[in-house]
Amino acid sequence: MNKALLDVLVCPVTKAPLTLSPEGDELISKVGGMAYPVRDGIPVLLESEARTLNADERLENGKN
């Protein structure tokens, strides 16, 4: 994903910054505890499409 695009994208719920998952298939909102899918290189920033991070993922993401 383009770094410039990633720098301007924010979580639609919390307005916090997003980070790209190591696999590159999700945008992670650490503050909101949600992961938004990236499909065919296009971020899907809809709350209804996001999944909630589990406790382990929240802890792991808090270290970054």
Image (cartoon, helix red, strand yellow):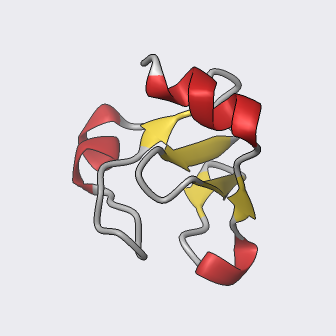
Residue at image coords 31%, 33%:
3
Classify 59 as above or below 37.
above
Residue at image coords 61%, 78%:
47
- Frontmost residue, 17 versus 63: 63
Seen in the image, is 13 located left or right of residue 54?
left
Q: Is residue 38 visible?
A: yes
Seen in the image, is 22 located left or right of residue 14?
right
Seen in the image, is 23 located left or right of residue 58?
right
Picture quarter with the C terminus? top left
Classify 20 as above or below 41.
above
Where is residue 29 drawn, in percent x and y? 47, 50
Residue 54: quadrant of the picture? top right
Where is residue 39 drawn, in percent x and y? 72, 55
Where is residue 35 drawn, in percent x and y? 64, 52
- Frontmost residue, 60 versus 25: 60
Residue at image coords 53%, 28%:
61
- Frontmost residue, 47 versus 33: 33
Image label count = 0
Q: Is residue 1 visible?
A: no
Residue 44: quadrant of the picture? bottom right
Seen in the image, is 60 located left or right of residue 23?
left
Residue 46: quadrant of the picture? bottom right
